[in-house]
Image: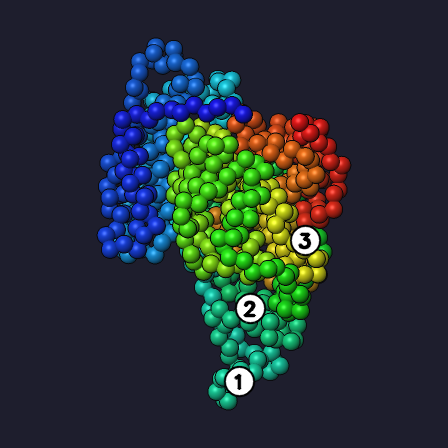
Amino acid sequence: MQKYTSVPATHKISGLLTVLIVITCWFSTAAHAAVSPIPLLVEQCLSYQLPTLPTASVQHRKSQTSDIQAIELERDLIGFFNINDRIKYYRQFPLNYGDRELLLQCQLYLADELALFFNSAKFQSIQFGLAGSDEPSVNALAMRLSRLAKNSDSPNYKAQLHTAQAAFKQGISSQSLSLNFLNEQCKLTDDDADSDKTSTIDFNGSLASYLIKQPNETCRQQVWQAYQARASSRNKAPLTRILDLRQQQARQVGFLDYSHQQLHEQWLSTPESVAQFLNGQTQAIDIAPWNLGPTLSQAQPTKVNPISAKLWLQQIATELETFAIAITPVNDKLYRVWLEGRLLGDIYITLSTKTQVKAIRQQVVGQQFGQIELELKAELKTYQQQSEVIDALARIISQFASGQKYYLANTIGETQDTAQIDTFWLQQYLKGKLLPALKQDSREALLQQYAWQLKVFRAKVALNTYLASDSPLKFNLESAFTEAFGARWENINDAPYTYSAIAYEGPVYYQSLWQKALANYIYQSTKDCQNQKLVFDYLVVNESSNKLADRLQLLLGEPITNDSLIKRTQHAFNHQDQHPRRCTLLRK
């Protein structure tokens, strides 16, 4: 493996990073401290300026190589990205009104600064210089910069879109529902309630409980469908506004509709490809949503031995040694991550009621080490809890181990729908080593199957919603629902109003499905190969900045096309090997 070259930061950025590092050293208590660190962070934020004027003459800049221009650009941007990441970190905590307003003010300021930079003469000059580079890492940076600059919408557009999205999300988050039952048998007897029963039941967050306790399937179906329809009336206007804004945006730049525009730069680059993939992922599980609770309650859970979070981390770390990853404890709350003796970053452990990863600072080779907070339960008693810790640590390792020397290449994927393939592959690998195989009728397997089909159906809904109204590519949603769940949703037109991701991700909602299916295929195809470290180096580290198509061809040993990959990923959760394993290069 090549050695990494450290790049010294400029005086201005060095000073800024010093302040950020000082803040980081006591971040674990900062959110709860008497004196908030946020005013200091915001002060640094509002005084920060991206350089918008050329710092060298035109003749001098022409004489600079593209990699030197890329390094100078990284020096200009790294402080900006660090501040932005820190703001995102603090926004995850419960904050007082003043701190929330300060962080919002800072975010708006940074957005304006970035827009000014993208419109500056300096950026135009740098972008032109990077575009013609033959260096893979510089080429990767130029592509990501172009995408980022092109996606800088006007303040007016963003204000309208974000307002509509917030209204839609608010409508979804409302859990209240009251129903008048004409059918007496649909009422549930509540031993704790007053003996004087009423025909109205308030469903404040109790739908799941009702569906589990109600023995009558017809009643369950009626209540579930009424619950799904609760936000339709209030959310039609926000979603219509979102659609209008996005369709206008797409047509202004020459696309038929927003689906075509968004998919244009993805790996699955057309609605036809996405539809082909989603149809291939559709399987009849015959578990209607209103029957999920009773079905799971009758299934047997997968048994695992309870284990402390500390010991579980040690077991995961042992498996990661295959990839020359070392996780060493500094103390009970701080772990240090290394790759072949090179420090990648620090993991701060916080005990909590759930597993959660909170990024603090991105690792960038030659610039800075990574920092992440990992929240864990003290003891992991179930398959799900242990699986969640594997998912979290795999996400951290894939973020830390990326061998790119530019921030954007570490944080933005080659395409939006391929950005997490390395993480999903590593999750699969570790679960295959540490967790028992799921029986098909186990509670966890049934839940996975249901969750997958629900997401496939919602991806079809999202694609439909953002296609032109007269598009022949639209799915028949009523048939799609019945095909997967073996039941009929009478008011299928309510489907777009039942999940908030449709307002944010839109037609690329399929992306996690595609990436998990592709990662699973890579895992199934290479899991018996002897040199697993080479798989890790190609897929996760990618020090040479190879494009994904080249890496897949190296890993799978045959030419890669969309059509062939879609066909190979049709059995995303079928662990039987569907294709021959070819370990030609991987035997090295």
Decide: is 20 above or below 492. above
Q: CA distance from mark 2 to mark 1?
A: 18 Å
Q: Which mark, residue 437?
A: 3
Q: Secondary structure at mark 3?
A: loop
**x then y, percent, for residue 245:** 45, 44
Q: Nearer the viewer, residue 369 or 187?
A: 369
The amino acid on which the numbered mark 2 sits, given as a three-letter code, is Ala
Q: How many marks?
A: 3
Decide: is 154 above or below 296. above
**x then y, percent, for residue 578:** 75, 42
Q: Nearer the viewer, residue 332 or 339?
A: 332
The amino acid on which the numbered mark 3 sits, given as a three-letter code, is Ala
Mark 2 Cα shell of 10 Å, populated few (<14), some (14-19), many (≥20): few
Q: Secondary structure at mark 1?
A: loop
Q: CA distance from mark 3 to mark 2?
A: 28 Å
Badge 1 is on which residue?
Answer: 191
* Residue depicted at 31% across the width and 39% down the height: 21
Badge 2 is on which residue?
Answer: 208
Quadrant for the N terminus in the image: top right
Mark 1 Cα shell of 10 Å, populated few (<14), some (14-19), many (≥20): few
Decide: is 114 above or below 381. above
Mark 3 Cα shell of 10 Å, populated few (<14), some (14-19), many (≥20): few
Decide: is 351 above or below 327. below
* Residue depicted at 66% across the width and 72% down the height: 217
**x then y, percent, for residue 379:** 50, 60
**x then y, percent, for residue 380:** 53, 59
* First of labels 1, 3 by sequence position: 1
Q: CA distance from mark 1 to mark 3?
A: 41 Å
